Image (cartoon, helix red, strand yellow):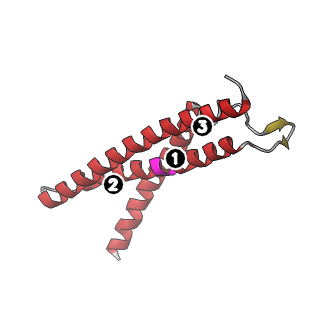
Amino acid sequence: MTRLRTYARRFAAAAPLAAASFFLTANAMAASGLINNLQDTGEAGFGVREPRSLPVTVGRIINVFLGILGIFAVVLIIYAGYLWMNARGNEQQVEKARSILTQAVIGLIIILASYSIAGFVVRNLVNATTGTR
């Protein structure tokens, strides 16, 4: 029963951090321009929706997918830090935490690089298909 309480406390402590990281990541991605700077947003005004072009739809799907992966990487970094703090001198647990932290940071770098590449490709596809610069 004490394990269940411990897990419940950990979840209660981690849930606000996970929610905050989700909203901060989503706002940062929206502000960075993968979606907002696209020429065809699909909105005609007053709630009338025009069909979106394929590059815009693909860009939005990529944006959501990379956002979820970014949140997962941040949660792994927090988990590795938690493991490291609670190692209490146990060298195996410190090594495990260090390994998770290293892999999560490498994954986050890859996610950010793929986000930049996807933004560049989608922006150029929209410009090429609509004929705008």
As for residue 1 lying within the magenta part, the answer is no
Which quarter of the figure has residue 91?
Answer: bottom left
**Residue at (44%, 39%) from the top-left corner?**
112
Whole-percent x, y for residue 66 in the image = 51, 47
Q: Earlier in the sequence, mark 2 or mark 1?
A: 1
Q: Earlier in the sequence, mark 3 or mark 1?
A: 1
Disc 3 marks which residue? 122
Disc 1 marks which residue? 67
**Residue at (37%, 66%) from the top-left corner?**
7
Q: Is residue 38 visible?
A: no
Disc 2 marks which residue? 79
Crowd rating for badge 1 (residues with CA inside 10 Å; few <14, some 14–19, many 20+):
many
Whole-percent x, y for residue 5 in the image = 38, 69
**Residue at (49%, 35%) from the top-left corner?**
116
Crowd rating for badge 2 (residues with CA inside 10 Å; few <14, some 14–19, many 20+):
some
**Residue at (12%, 55%) from the top-left corner?**
89
The residue nearer to you, when weighing 75 against 42, is 42
Span of residues in magenta? 66-70
Q: Nearer the viewer, mark 3 or mark 2?
A: 3
Crowd rating for badge 3 (residues with CA inside 10 Å; few <14, some 14–19, many 20+):
many
The residue nearer to you, when weighing 87 against 130, is 130
- Compared to residue 82, the image places residue 56 above or below, namely above
Q: Secondary structure at mark 2?
A: helix
Horizontal relation, residue 101 to residue 24: left or right:
left
Alpha-carbon distance for marks 3 and 1?
Answer: 16 Å
Which disc, if any, is residue 115? none
Which quarter of the figure has residue 129?
Answer: top right
Quadrant in which the C terminus appears:
top right
- Compared to residue 88, the image places residue 74 above or below, namely above
Alpha-carbon distance for marks 2 and 1?
Answer: 18 Å
Quadrant in which the N terminus appears:
bottom left
